[in-house]
Amino acid sequence: MQLRVLGKSPAWQDAGGACSGYLVEAGGTRVLLDCGSGVFGKLRSVVDYADVDAVVVSHLHGDHILDLVPYASGLIYAPRHQPVAVDGSPGTDEPPRPRLLAPPGARDTFRRLCSAAGMREQHIETAFALEEYNPARPARVASLEVTFQPVPHFLPTQAVAIADGAQRLTYSADSSPSDELCAFARGTDLLLIEATLPRPEREGPRGHLTPGEAGDHGRRAGARRLVLTHISDELDAEWARREAERTFGGPVEVAREGAVYDLSIGS
Ligand SMILES: [Zn+2]
Ligand SMILES: [Zn+2]
């Protein structure tokens, strides 16, 4: 299994960067994990977006979903699928319809997003085969098993694990400190974990982790490799790596756009 970082920015993009988006490839199956602002263009630079089998969405914050709108436009309106019928339905060259696995309530959120942006209300669900997943139930995409773990954040959010036989990748999504996340990631081959904050939130409910907390979660989970993400280019990456290594007790990597991690190769 291979993980490619398309975008690793938090809620605002790095210079020239993209918000959350990760391409997971295994045995000819392609899964896009989250699709935040800027991710669609990055996806296009590495694969044909029509060849993605499924998009899996961790939660419905804009920095994890907004590029589903242009992605849907490409699937529906790209020249290779013309002519599009007058009523907006696909033309004779039936475009592919990747699966879209999104949290409960996603259909309503996507409809409001699309209509607010001047698109047809069903723009996203026309382009994708939308399934609102049950976080308590595993999903399957070809040979890959996708499992979910609710984590504490500002709105309902799932950490996501993708397993291909013996290899397992775990993605924290956005999360404040969570024992459940540590248990869910137990023994994972690679934990891709958010490290958004230079220091814990000063007030109000917590929603994110510091690099030190991310390292601590990796150690408690017994993760074989730890990669920090959801981290701004305005935060010193070297400082973040050192902070995480101190609590993880081993080498830590900071996600870079374009980086590829092969889970069959140890760190
Ligand atoms: Zn986020
Ligand atoms: Zn979020």
Image: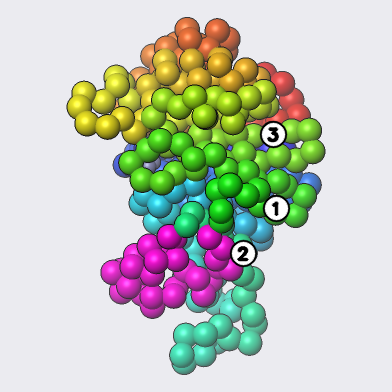
Residue type for callout 3 = Arg
Q: Quadrant of residue 261?
A: top right
Q: Give the left or right position of residue 161, taking residue 8 as reference.
A: right
Tell me which numbered mark, 1 or 3, is placed earlier along the sequence: 1
Dividing the image into 4 quarters, which one contains the C terminus?
A: top right
Question: Farthest residue toward the left?
Answer: 203
Rate crowding at label 3 as few (under 14), some (14 to 19) or many (20 or more) other CA atoms within 10 Å: many
- Residue 238: give x, y in percent of width and height: 42, 15
- Residue 74: give x, y in percent of width and height: 51, 68
Residue type for callout 2 = Pro
Contact? badges 2 and 3 (CB < 8 Å): no
Residue 113 on the magenta span: yes
Residue 257 visible, this angle? no
Residue 140 is tagged as: 1
Residue that badge 3 annotates: 168
Which residues make up the magenta segment? 105-132
Q: Looking at the image, is mark 2 or mark 3 nearer the viewer? A: 3
Residue that badge 2 annotates: 98
